[in-house]
Amino acid sequence: MALPKRIMKETERLVADPAPGITAAPHGDNLRYFDVTIQGPDGSPFQQGVFRLELFLPEEYPMSPPKVRFLTKIYHPNIDKLGRICLDILKDKWSPALQIRTVLLSIQALLSAPNPDDPLATDVAKHYKEDEKDAQRVSREWTEKYASN
Amino acid sequence: MDQVAHRGFRSASLSNKAKQSVGPEFIITQNHPVQAMDYVEQPNSNLVCCICHAPFTNPTTARTCMHTFCCDCITVAVQHSPQCPIDRSSLSLDDLSPANPIVKHLVDELVVECPNRVSGCTQTFQRQLLSIHIKDACQYVEIPCSEEQCDKMILRKDVGKHKDACVYRSTQCDGCGVTIKYSDLSNVGQTHNSECSSKSATCSFCSEEFPRSQSQTHAATCLDYEIPCTHANNGCPWIGPRRQLSDEHARSCPYEAIKGFFSINSAQITALSTENAALKQKNQALDSVVQTMQREIQTIRHVLGPWCRSDIQGQTSPVAAPSIINAFDQLALSATAGPSSSRSISHIILPSADQGELVFPEVNALAPYFPIPPENTYPESHHYPRSRPSFSGMADPHSHPQISQRALPLTPVAPLNLSTSLEGSLSGLRDSVAAVSTSVDSLARRNDIALTNESMRVNEELGSLRYAVHGIRLQVTGRAGEPLSPLLGQPIFHPPMMAPPFPGTPGTKL
């Protein structure tokens, strides 16, 4: 199936006018598969880290949300050890008016504001709830360990 | 599930409605999706659908939240999730309606590039004029060749060039001027050039050139033209140039020497074949006559049913052939052999006119089925009164002559008339039986009357006798006192006195 005009436009814009701290480049053999990097937001435990993600646009896109997963290990209450992300707009709150750029910005924002009340990695969430400072310390350690070039 | 199906149905009806309202744009979207078109200028973001990221196609507004989308985009989105893609307020297909016409005009007037830009068309025009451009103006649209047989698709700009090159184009033969397809001319089909009467042809025997229209005349006169011998149909195998036929070959041809015989022979054969044909025709006619007759005989047999006894075995004649011809032979045999053998042909019931002399054995053969002629049939009825002794004396003189005279006219039961139809014979027999029974009835009645008359007369006579006896007794008693001797000497015998009335003089009264 030919690539929809919308995906082509989005790709063009992502490459030509990327959002700050975010890069996304499609694979040459599959234009629906993107290699993504997100810089850890300033003021968060993930600062200075560059996190790699993969993003796939399913056949139904934009009626279905894109599938996004962290490839880089990250200590975050809403991201499990497999890299899966707990984010409402990637699930039931998806809207066709959203796009790749907004999804990636939302993930970037999730790094700044972890939400331990809606956890995916329960042990990390528990750690964040009980001792946020110590948890942030672990997050920084992981960022330095896994997300530094 | 039902809800989903229902939504699907409504979405289809809605999108159809929307498409009908815009008309030509629907046609465009078939071949050239408007979403895929390139706009010359970056369109105002207010005119861009958030779902397909292109200027609206059939703009449709949600009545609840007043957001506008392409008709197709929002229909599919609502089917996936019944909410507005922008503000997530709940939304159903019923809430959708065509957008304000201003929006439609704004997007229709956006300037787009021709979809055939890749092929070379550099034109730009308003989006609403796309269909007209594609249909009439765009030089880079592939259209079929106007020649019916040609199945090539040509860019509109190349139509003129193709018209001069198309092998199916019409052209004129430079010889005869007839308009024909180019493909029928020399270098393609070799068809017209080999037929055109204006083109020159060469005789393959004398190498002379002449217009093709004269080829037949030339063939009839060319001295080098190879022709067969004039006796070819009689068997001469010679074929050679016309110039040799009359002198060289005629002298050596063995058939030429006996050409007189050929003419006589062929005339005779013609006459014989004509005659043969006539005979064949006649034979066929006769065959059909025979078939017709066979059919008729079958029908007659069928009608006769049990009257037709076929193939009685163990009879005097050894052969009871079913075929009509055999039966005819048999008939002739039995006629000579006599009536005794005639049973074998009993299955031929109705004699035809030709077989008149053979009727007698046949009647004998059929005898068991038919009554005997009256002279033989009624002997008993003649004897009947006489066989009763009690009547022989008295009734016979009165009744017999009357009965016999009246009974005779009541016997029309002639020997069965075989020349009439079977139904006729049967009804005749039935009539005869009825007549016989009537006559039997009347006979019985007459007998009764005669008997009554007789007994009355006898009674009368008895009475008179009794009377006489009574008188005699009185006389006897009167003479009682007289001596018995004279009485004894004159014995009284009544029978001698009564005898006279009986022997044949009826009506005698005492």
Image (cartoon, rainbow, N blue to C red):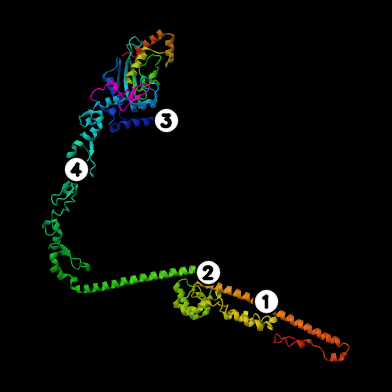
- For label 4, the SS is loop
Q: Which residue is mark 2?
A: B306
Q: Earlier in the sequence, mark 4 or mark 1?
A: 4
Percent x, y for residue A16? 26, 19
Q: Earlier in the sequence, mark 2 or mark 1?
A: 2
Which label lies toward us, 3 or 2? 3
Q: Residues within 10 Å of mark 3 (few under 14, many from 20)?
A: few
Relative to B330, residue B175 above or below: above
Could you tell me which chain the residue with mark 3 belongs to? B
Q: Quadrant of the N terminus of chain B?
A: top left
For badge 4, the amino acid type reads Cys
Q: Which residue is mark 4?
A: B166
Image mark for residue B6: 3
Residue B42 colored in magenta in the image = yes
Relative to B106, residue B334 above or below: below
**Is circle 3 on the same chain as circle 4?**
yes
The Cα–Cα distance between marks 2 and 1, rounded to whole angstroms, is 42 Å
Q: Quadrant of the C terminus of chain B?
A: bottom right
Relative to B162, residue B223 above or below: below
Could you tell me which chain the residue with mark 2 belongs to? B
For badge 1, the amino acid type reads Asp
Q: Give the quadrant of residue B135.
A: top left
Specify start and end residues of the magenta stretch as a single range.
B40-69
Residue B67 colored in magenta in the image = yes
Q: Give the quadrant of residue A147.
A: top left
